[in-house]
Amino acid sequence: MDQFLDVSRFCYMFFNIFVVVLSLMFLKLFLRCCILPVRAQKKLRENGFVGPPPSFPLGNLNDMKKLKTALVAEKSKSSIIINHDIHSIALPHFALWQQQYGKVFVYWLGIEPFVYVADPEFLSVMSKGVLGKSWGKPNVFKKDREPMFGTGLVMVEGDDWTRHRHIITPAFSPLNLKTMTNMMVESTSNMLDRWCIQINSGNLEFDMENEIIGTAGEIIAKTSFGVRGENGTQVLKNLRAMQFALFNSNRYVGVPFSNVLAFKQTLKAKELGKEIDGLLLSIINERKRSLVVEGDQDHHHHDLLGMLLKADKWKFTATELVDECKTFFFAGHETTALALTWTFMLLAIHPEWQDTLRDEIRQVIGDSEIEYNKLAGLKKMSWVMNEVLRLYPPAPNAQRQARRDIEVNGRVIPNGTNIWIDVVAMHHDAELWGDDVNEFKPERFDGNLHGGCKNKMGFMPFGFGGRMCIGRNLTTMEYKIVLSLVLSRFEISVSPGYRHSPKYMLSLRPGFGLPLIVRPL
Ligand code: HEM
């Protein structure tokens, strides 16, 4: 009998604990999904931040989807015409809301509030001096992109960010970049030799986006962690597959339990992430061993990983090194490839600029091998690069999250609020650039780093402040090498099959690829 009483008392206690835990979980969920968003909305409204009304639990995600579908259907009728006024094509919801609410307004991804900013003045005030340190990266994206970036430089914050940036910066020094010239020339030459074989077989049409993405992927994997042998190829394959798994279909970022909705994708990305980490770890351990054996005599690994290992005396843990390798790949490969892809589209419709650049390449490089030191002399090519990054920025937005209440121009942005900086909108704003804002005019950058933009924060293809892109010199180098090699051997024109439809898919890319006609000179 006593035993029975003990068991029933235990069950009763267990049941009570279970009910309390369940209630606490429910309370937490209720607080996170209902109370906090309502309070944030009230506070934002009190501070003058208004925008399209959100609904629970999707926020404005449905409106975004509907506007995108409707406006894209309308615009696609004229997609044969190449129009650089792309804001309303790529980001129709923002273009419409901007007309209704101005250049700073609030919208919602699920239960996450985002202050939209397309006003460089607002941006410069919010990122000035100590205020700049009060911003982090949105937690909602950190979670979503964890398999890609882990705790790499793109995502870390505070003292950790200072330490990572301090260790990594020297790896991108001109002296180190110089040693990567041959890797870039080699991968590009291989691509061009393949083009020759295809052209000789009578097929002059290439999907330039595919071609360049493949080569840029190879280059970044070589320059980041030395893609060699089977391990390297497998890492490259898995990295691409992971990106595809994470971003191929619509994800409900900010919506409670969105991971459950995209369960299969999330699981696949996690599995691939684990496999990539294992492969990278074996590459890193192998390098460490060879460094111990060869010491500073290791001349074989002129890549970022090799440089970090040599310079760093292993201040990074192995996990941190793995995350940095992944970060270099994801932050650097598609962005550079898209800068080149859009350049080929613009040069294909502006043959006069192909000729101008060819003349410059002849003068600066001549018939000799490409040397790093000569690249700075390709000045007009720098104007073209800037103009392409202005019209078609591969990183079309930047995001931040307030780590405390932050006052900007007398308005408080509550702690936890996310910021969405619309780079495309600022790069296409006639009030900042003038009436020719949507024309391809590389000469606007002649002697002017900001292309004549009325506010220098209005031109930010590589971000802003202390978190400005660490890879921008590497990108410029790769851009100039690839473009010089291509233009020295080929002329390009647009294929009749090209449909102009810039699409926002994390980066800004051609919606239907970039078919171009390539002819040997
Ligand atoms: C055209 C090419 C590129 C573009 C348009 C680009 C754009 C950007 C932008 C806009 C940011 C700032 C993001 C933010 O503020 O949240 C950034 C940061 C970063 N980029 Fe790039 N990037 C390019 C190439 C590269 C390359 C080649 C690498 C590396 C190999 C790289 C590595 C990084 C890293 C690690 C960060 C984070 C820096 C930090 O937070 O301290 N990027 N990039």
Image (spheres, helix red, strand yellow):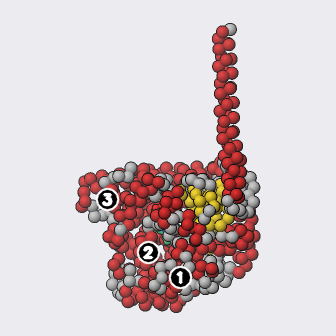
Lower position in the chain sequence, tag 1 or tag 3: 3
The residue labelled by disc 1 is 452
Identify the residue at horizontal 68%, vertical 62% (top origin): 49
Q: For label 2, count other residues whose C-alpha is less than 10 Å away and answer few (under 14), some (14-19) or many (20+).
A: some
- Residue appearing at x 44%, y 53% in the figure: 159
Residue 95 spot, x, y in % from top left? 69, 72
Which residue appears at 41% of the width and 70% of the height?
474
Mark 3 CB in 8 Å range of ligand 1? no
The residue that appears at 38% across and 66% down in the rendered structure is 172
> Label 1, label 3: how many angstroms apart (C-alpha)?
39 Å
Measured Cα–Cα span from mark 2 to mark 1: 21 Å
Residue holding disc 3: 311
Amino acid marked by disc 3: Ala
Label 1 near ligand 1 (CB < 8 Å): no
Residue 207 placement (x, y as % from top left): 56, 76
Farthest residue to the front: give it: 410
Callout 1: few (<14), some (14-19), or many (20+) C-alpha neighbours within 10 Å?
Answer: some
Image height of 118 relative to 382, above or below? above
Q: Is residue 431 above or below residue 278?
A: below
Q: Looking at the picture, tell me which residue is in the foreground, 323 or 497.
A: 323
Where does label 2 land, which residue?
476
The answer to which of marks 2 and 3 sits earlier in the sequence is 3
Judged from the image, the secondary structure of the residue bearing numbered disc 3 is helix
